[in-house]
Image: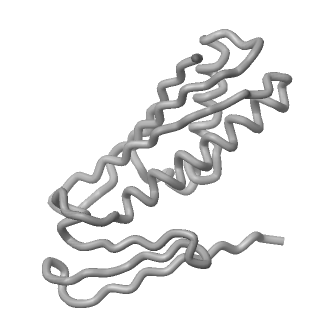
Amino acid sequence: MAIRRTSEAVWHGGLKDGHGKMVVGKGVFEGQYSFASRFENGEGTNPEELIAAAHAGCFTMFLSAILEKDGFKPESLKTTATVYLELKEEGPRITRIDLVVEGKVPGIDAETFKKYAETAKDNCPVSIALAGVPEKTVKATLL
């Protein structure tokens, strides 16, 4: 049985003069967005920040799961995801996502931790859903 999750967006007006609101789930997060918050440095959020949050959250949970499965239970993992939006001739495109994870994981060496991070980057559900993004990187550091 599939688990269903829902979010919504409302937009008022044209592209450059309009504004909208995105609601995650049952309202646990609401964010205003606009042309300026997406393509400039205006106030509010944007879809790419939400993609970055989703990717960071999914990757981090997946990494925790595969580490623990093999006997390396993390004390903590912190991931920052950076999504790059480029204006191409055919329109805006997400061209790259960088994941940077820092972890406190007893009993593991840095090289092994990096291998687990690569596996999580390639196999978490959000990474798989974002298969159309041409470049995904991961940098893993033990604390």
| Residue at 34 percent of width and 64 percent of height | 46
Displayed quadrant of residue 50 = bottom left
The quarter of the image holding the C terminus is: top right
Measuring from the top left, give residue 123's x and y in whole percent: 64, 42
Measuring from the top left, give residue 69's x and y in whole percent: 84, 32
Measuring from the top left, give residue 40's x and y in whole percent: 16, 59
Q: Is residue 115 visible?
A: yes
Q: Nearer the viewer, residue 91 or 57?
A: 57
Q: Is residue 91 visible?
A: no
Left-right relation of 139 to 69: left
| Residue at 19 percent of width and 62 percent of height | 42
Q: Nearer the viewer, residue 143 or 54?
A: 143
In the image, residue 116 above or below residue 18 = above
Measuring from the top left, give residue 136's x and y in whole percent: 44, 38
Left-right relation of 13 to 138: left
The quarter of the image holding the N terminus is: bottom right
Displayed quadrant of residue 63 = top right
